Amino acid sequence: MIFKLLVVWQAISQPLISFTDEEIASVKEHDLPNYTLLIPLLREEKVISQIIEAITAIDYPKDKLDVIITLEEYDHKTIDSIKKVNLPAYFKILILPNVTPKTKPKALNVAFPQTKGEFVVIYDAEIIPDSDQLKKAYLAFKKYPDIGCLQTRLDHYNANQNIITRLFNAEFSFYYDLFLPGLQKMGYPIPLSGHSTHFRRSILEKIGAWDPYNVAEDCDIGIRLHRKGYKTEILNSFSKEEATSNLNDWMKQRSRWMKGFIQTSIVHLRHPLRFKNEIGGWSNLLGFLFTVPGTVIINILNLFYWILLLGWFITGSVLIQSFFPGPILYLSVISFVLGNVMFTWLNLIGAYKRKRYSMVKYSLLSSVYWILLAIATVRALIQIILNPYHWEKTNHGEHLLKKNYSIVPVEAN
């Protein structure tokens, strides 16, 4: 609780990298470098038209765009859907061999040697980035030569679809507007998102690109960038994605993320003292422990203690009471009350900060959302033992089938 409060406190005074409309308009197109867009697709036939439209709408010289779409050779539906689309000349299709591991980072690694851009960005199938995002990233890389990676802010275009998407969006509002900027201000390593992250190609090459076996390759590469001494900053540009709108898809997606957090923790903590030195000392190590493995541990403990509480209410078990002698009981009650209130409030102000006032009331259900998150984490822990490299695919395109909801705008500042 103290850690997150300190991080959020730092975020309040942390300006994001921003550029005015005039600065963007003043960019001369002949000065712009080649820019590679990596778009890994798997079973995405529903959103092919959407991603093509989103990419072609980007305000950047087309002759300087290097768009690489990766497809799995066994994914016949997506391949057939791509064939029906009249792709622009600057799009390139790369068919991946049917080999393991069958993960997104494997696809990125196969495509990486063919990239031509000075800068590289990853876009997932359902992403709609701001049209001027590449120019903003170019200006940021040019202005700050010590930056190796730029993380954009994420949002959902179907945030108002149902209760799951509303709670998901409140979580994202807190994470990308308050938590990540705070981590950056404090100099802690940043677990990146899986898309809309911009890299200098030369730095990706130096760090060995992505770990093909990590199902949260974004988190892992963020930590590796920090270990190698490269800075990550937050760019004030939005990419809008589809929030998973049914419980089954949400559970699979979140289990994959938590499994990747476990993988990342195991890999980087194999040599803890060396890791401590490379990441920047005890303070940064503590930040990593709270942010990555700490997230997993807290989620599991949260479920365990809810079960204990429920069991005590139902049975009045003396055995459960024996675990909580006086001082422990008082500390636990304070943690239970203050912790739930504080984290609910943080999600609430995340939605409020984006001026999504209609979403604020749904943040009051955050405790229920965290129980679901705890279940997903336990599921991830089981998977890391039984099937550590299995990639549970998130289904996209549900928002196209159910349009009986309103799109909620978001403020860019």
Image (cartoon, rainbow, N blue to C red):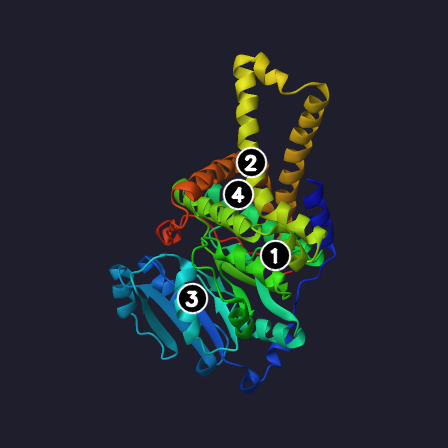
Which label's residue is closer to the chain start, 4 or 3?
Answer: 3
In the structure shown, which secondary structural element does the residue marked by tag 4 occupy? helix
Which label's residue is closer to the chain start, 4 or 2?
Answer: 4
In the structure shown, which secondary structural element does the residue marked by tag 2 occupy? helix
Dot 1: few (<14), some (14–19), or many (≥20) neighbours within 10 Å? many
**Circle 3 sits on which residue?**
109
Asked if the residue under mark 3 is in contact with the one under mark 4, i.e. CB atoms within 8 Å, the reply is: no
Label 2 or label 3, whichever lies nearer to me, is 3
The quadrant of the picture occupied by the N terminus is top right
Question: The disc labelled 2 sits on which kind of residue?
Answer: Leu
**Circle 4 sits on which residue?**
167
The answer to which quarter of the image holds residue 115 is bottom left
Question: The disc labelled 3 sits on which kind of residue?
Answer: Asn
Label 4 or label 3, whichever lies nearer to me, is 3
**Circle 1 sits on which residue?**
190
**Circle 2 sits on which residue?**
365
Considering depth in this image, is 271 or 158 the residue closer to the camera?
271
Q: CA distance from mark 3 to mark 1?
A: 21 Å
Q: CA distance from mark 4 to mark 3?
A: 33 Å
Label 1 or label 4, whichever lies nearer to me, is 1
The answer to which quarter of the image holds residue 180 is bottom right
Q: CA distance from mark 2 to mark 1?
A: 27 Å
